Image (tube, rainbow, N blue to C red):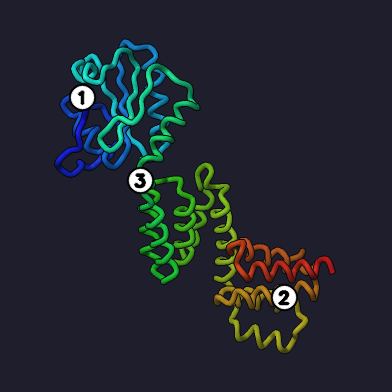
Amino acid sequence: MFGTPTTPPAPVANDLIIDGSEASFMQDVIEPSQITPIIVDFWAPWCGPCKTLGPALEAAVTAAKGSVRMVKINVDENQALAAQLRIQSIPTVFAFFQGQPVDAFQGNIGASDLKRFVDKLAAMGPAPDNGLADAIAAAETMLEDGEFADAVETFTAILEEEPENVAAYAGLIRAHLALGDLDLAETLITTAPGALAKAKEVEATRAMLDLARQAASAGPEDDLRAAHAADPKNPQILFDLATALHANGKVEEAVSTLLDLFKLDREWNNNAARTQLFTIFDALKPQDPIVLAGRRRLSSMIFA
């Protein structure tokens, strides 16, 4: 019925759901379906079931996040096209891929059947665009390379596209921490919207913020090492030395020093050594070797 176009496929419209017509059918449906599956919903303003099916179908297409797209065609205004496709009742829904109809149904269907219809069609197309994932990876590389301002800009741009992207939101906080913008980082943490506030990635930045504030007031490492050598069983000196070590990026040695403090006096200053250890662990990835080794040594002391 519809042949493959002799010209390259037209770019798919930015909108996932558009209104189409007989005149634009090639441009809106046939050509873009060479790449992305297209759902065509034939409806009319007087059709009661259409008023139920249409919004449900739009929601399913939106949830597919670009894996499929949808064109809505009013049969009253496009009777010749409806006749060509032998549409005898509405709602009627066609699915097109690579220029040809690949599936269809008439009437209203349940939510689970509708989801299966959309998921089946989405599976025919290419893998979803992972542009945001690539952008996040690039921003993380910027952080590792010390390009903190560029990382802030990139994470911000990602959040403009997807405001609830957890990785980008947590990354933005970490970038501000790296820049020393502690107050701004704290504001982002305390005002994190919805599910972001409870995400483990954002929770980890709370520990990072605590450690960053401690680092700002940490004493000179060399002086504290000398003080520890002179008084090796002084718990306050051990704690301050661990803080200075962490501030200078010597995380593993800071953990070891806190474990020494815990072994010396586990209840000192309301369990300060244990609390600080968990703060450091929370700021690192759960499978970080420093975390795994530190937790094992701490457990062996607790249960000894």
Between the C-alphas of marks 1 and 2, the distance is 77 Å
Tell me the mark number nearer the camera, choosing from 1 and 3.
3
On residue 126, the disc is: 3
Residue at numbered disc 1: 21
- Which percent across, then down, holds residue 141? 41, 66
Bin the neighbour count of mark 2 within 10 Å (Cα to Cα): few under 14, some 14-19, many 20 and up: some
Q: Residue at x 20, y 29 (%)?
A: 25
Residue 138 versus residue 214: which sits nearer the camera? 138
Q: Quadrant of the N terminus?
A: top left
Helix, strand or loop at mark 2: helix
Amino acid found under the numbered disc labelled 2: Gln
User: Which residue is drawn at the image coordinates 30% and 30% (left, top)?
Assistant: 101
- Residue 13 seen in this snapshot: no
> Between marks 3 and 2, how big is the CA–CA gap?
60 Å
Amino acid type, label 3: Pro
In space, the residues marked 1 and 3 are separated at their CA atoms by: 26 Å
Residue 142: horizontal and vertical position, in percent? 40, 66
252 shown above or below 102:
below
Circles 1, 2 touching at the beta carbon (< 8 Å): no
Q: Mark 3 or mark 1, which is nearer the start of the sequence?
A: 1
User: Whole-percent x and y of residue 106?
Assistant: 37, 18
- 4 left or right, relative to 146: left
- Tell me where residue 125 sits by quadrant: top left
Q: Inspect the image, locate mark 1, and give the three-letter code of the amino acid beneath it.
A: Ser
**Of marks 3 and 2, which one's residue comes earlier in the chain?**
3
Up-down: is 156 above or below 89?
below
What residue is at 50 percent from the left and 53 percent from the top? 187
- Classed neighbour count for the residue bearing mark 1: other residues with Cα under 10 Å, few (<14), some (14–19), many (≥20): some
Q: Quadrant of residue 260?
A: bottom right
Residue for badge 2:
236
